[in-house]
Amino acid sequence: MIRSMTGFGDASGDHDGAHFSVEVRSVNNKYCKVVLRLPETLQGLEPELDAALRKRLGRGTITLTVKCAETGEGAAHEINRAALDKYMSQLKDVAGGADADLSVLLTLPGVLVPSTSEEERLANARKTVLPLLGKAIDHLQAMRKREGMALSEELLMYRREITQRLEEIDRLAPGVVADYERRLQERIQTLLDGSDVGAEPADLVREIAVYAEKSDIAEEVARLREHMSHFEDLLASDDERPLGRTLDFLAQEMLREANTIASKSPDARIARLIVEIKGSIDRIKEQVQNVE
């Protein structure tokens, strides 16, 4: 089953006096590009979060946003008494013994320090953020699958259009050589009308054989039909791996066969059908850019 590259998922939870929210968004990209937006206190989790995203998501520009709001007593910083006493002592010396404004002193570097170490904060956050990320990715993947089902229906519609036109080409192709033979005989008859010279049957047969070989599109039609069958099999596959690049390559091969048919067949009706086929292939190529 194919998946779209566009999706959104989120999850939130509380742990040890802190509220965490995780959002994952993805849009189209030929490769896998991860963008992390984390609070400064969680920067140490970047490698783990990046690896978790890349393990689950194959393609797309993936943006992860993590927010943290401390709601418990752990949000309160502790006062570094030694640093505060040092600042007060220096200010009294400068100000001649005048009392310093304590609110100002608390804003000075090193006076207020976190109640827990960076490693402890990361360890506590890791216990919550990684499971929340897993849930957010699950929600994103569910959305990608829903959009992938809609994409699959649209791609199958284009496949049916191409198949119908190939059937029409199969019906017209045998008459192309017969029409050429008839027109050739008419032209020769017109040129030789009133002349004692006649056309050699062997020459006519050779000319028609050469034309038939040059305009034979059976092989290209068969290959295009095989590509369409492979295309349908991929859309119906239960394979969880990303299929977007494979579908894109297959669409390029379809277009190559259609171009070859157009160049080999001089029949106007077949040419018109090929134009319609190429239009459907172009729409396939546009839509598979959205497939993971």
Image (cartoon, rainbow, N blue to C red):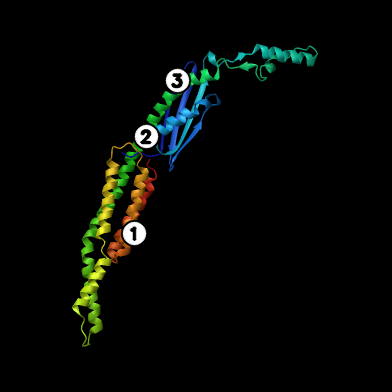
Question: Please, what is the three-letter code of the amino acid marked with disc 3?
Answer: Lys
Q: Disc 3 designates what residue?
A: 127
Question: Where is residue 157 shown, x and y percent of the image?
Answer: 29, 48
The secondary structure type at the circle numbered 2 is: helix
How much space separates mark 3 and mark 2, taking CA atoms?
26 Å
Query: Is residue 70 in sight in this rendering?
Result: no
Q: Nearer the viewer, mark 3 or mark 2?
A: 3
Which of the image's four quarters has the N terminus?
top left
The secondary structure type at the circle numbered 3 is: helix
Task: Choose top left, top right, bottom left or bottom right for residue 91.
Answer: top right
Q: Residues within 10 Å of mark 1 (few under 14, many from 20)?
A: some
Question: Where is residue 143 shown, x and y percent of the image?
Answer: 37, 34
Q: Disc 1 designates what residue?
A: 259
State which tag comes first along the sequence, 1 or 3. Answer: 3
Q: Residues within 10 Å of mark 2 (few under 14, many from 20)?
A: some
**Residue placed furthest toward the left:** 201
Question: Where is residue 122 shown, x and y percent of the image?
Answer: 50, 21
Residue at horizontal 34%, vertical 38%? 241
Q: Is residue 209 above or below residue 145?
A: below
Question: Please, what is the three-letter code of the amino acid marked with disc 2?
Answer: Met
